[in-house]
Image: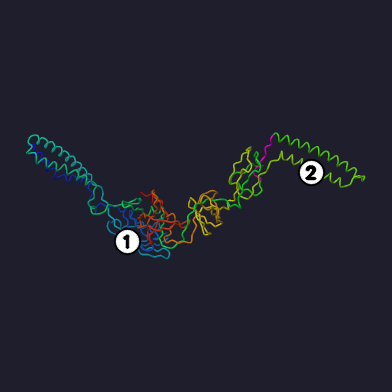
Amino acid sequence: MLPRLAAALAVALLLTAPLFAREGHAQPASDHAMTPGTARAAAVSDAFELVVVAGSGTLSLYIDDFATNAPVQGAAVTVETPSGSLEAAPDGMHYRLDAPFLSKPGRHDLIVTVSAGTALDIIPLTLVTSQQLSTEPVETAGIRDLSKWLTWAGILLAGVGIGRATAWRSRRATPAIALALLLLGSWPDDAHAHEGHDHGDDKKPALSASGDRAQRLADGTLYVPKPVQRIFGVRTALTASGAFKHSVELPGRIIPDPNASGFVQASVGGRLSAPTGGFPRLGTPVRKGDVLAFVSPPIQQIDVSDMRQRQGELDQQIAIVETRLARYTRLATTGTVSRQLVEEAQIELQGLKDRRTALDKSRAQPEALMAPVDGIVADGTPVAGQITQPNAVVFHIVDPARLWVEALSFAAIAPAAATATTANGRTLGLSFRGSGFADRNQSIPVQFAIEGDTAGLRAGQFVTVLVATDGKREGMAVPRSAVVRNANGQDFVFEHTAPERFAARAVRIESLDGERVLIVAGIDPGKRVVTRGAELLDHVR
């Protein structure tokens, strides 16, 4: 009896399992699909790039310039819809219009007319929307929960029946065992396979991207919605092949103009002291001849003794000459002594007094250190009481408006146009000043003067110098910001392949000038290459 009961239960479960297994099973795509807010359509023309996004009873239109990807603002936008001709109004960086026809799911043919300046274009496109089903009634969910419990209870009874039938009579239990194994082997897999699965999309590729979230797709391309492109500030340019002068890249650094800079040094060693107002701080403007510090030479004890002895000798000689001059003056009034002797005595006395005064000054007056040129204090850390050595640099004065660049070249360079690029991407115009003849670490120093504004630059700052040569190379010139380098050192650019798609293209580049590089391989002319925002696109995952 039990084997027959087990077999009956197994057959019943096998027949009803497909019904129970469909719990959570999605309806066909015609009934259960994306909400209207995720429906999108895109189209391009010779002048514009258009993306339409369906919202809750509204349409958002993102219109960009085809070549530059810049948002088109101030345009007149008219949309022919199933509800008639509607005008789109500006809404920030895009356009918006009311779309009552979106309440009905299906295909909506749209014709968008865009007039911006002298450009006028008519862009047709089709928007497909569908309505999402509401959740199931509570009664249906309760029935399915009950069916699930009954199913597992039936499986348990079937297992017990099979076990007892096997113990009692293995020959009669064989059909029940086969049916139960078939049930247990196929039903759970079928249930898991159906859970959350949409049969309506079995023959359709899975959606790779939707909504307003940028992401990297399985094929390596990037899906970047238009709102995100606005945030990133993505801009593009059409590549065009041409012949450009080849440039040589040289390492260099900024140096002061030799005619507008100077060192403040002490001629003798001594103790530093500050002038009135204190030592000038770094960056303080100074004028030529300004006293920046004083140096008091140290006097040894033996030198003090010698100086005192010399002072005594001078004082004695001064007293003798004064006495002689007084006597000569009295005798000159009587005509006994000539006027010439009186004048010679006066000159001798004045000389002795000058020597005595200079000797006093050498003991008490320090040496004044003065600025040799106009400029600012670029370097110098003097401290009161500091002992400085002869020829030691106390201050470095630089004119910040007159700076040069010194580059190192491994070959002789004729005077040519050149530019320099700083670490933060700033480009500096250069004019050739001269090239060295002597070897410096197997290289030749080449000097250029910086033309234009020098604000924010400093002496010693490293730069990259690009010197144009007479040779020409074929390629496509793009801004340096368009090229991104990955972890393994490969250079690549992003091609704008579709309104919301970007693809990375590996390229080979050469230096062209301070703002551009030359793509010599990796991409064809006429492609849209991202020139701004490439670094942000590289971080999309």
Screen quadrant of the N terminus: top left
Residue 145 percent location from the top left of the image: 20, 41
**Residue 297 falls within the magenta-colored stretch:** yes
Please report the bounds of the magenta region as a residue range: 291-300
**Amino acid type, label 2:** Gly
The coloring applied to the image is: rainbow
Q: Which residue is mark 2?
A: 351
Camera-nearest residue between 448 and 230: 448
Residue 446 percent location from the top left of the image: 54, 54
**Residue 295 falls within the magenta-colored stretch:** yes
Give the foreground label among 1 and 2.
Answer: 2
Q: Secondary structure at mark 1?
A: strand
* Separation (CA) of disc 1 from disc 2: 107 Å
Camera-nearest residue between 88 and 10: 10
Q: Is residue 107 above or below residue 139?
A: below
Q: Which residue is mark 1?
A: 125
Q: Give the residue at the far right of this rendering.
A: 334
Residue 28 percent location from the top left of the image: 23, 52
At 58% from the left and 45% from the top, the residue drawn is 379
Question: Does any portion of residue 452 appear in the rendered image?
Answer: no
**Amino acid type, label 1:** Leu
Dominant secondary structure, magenta: strand
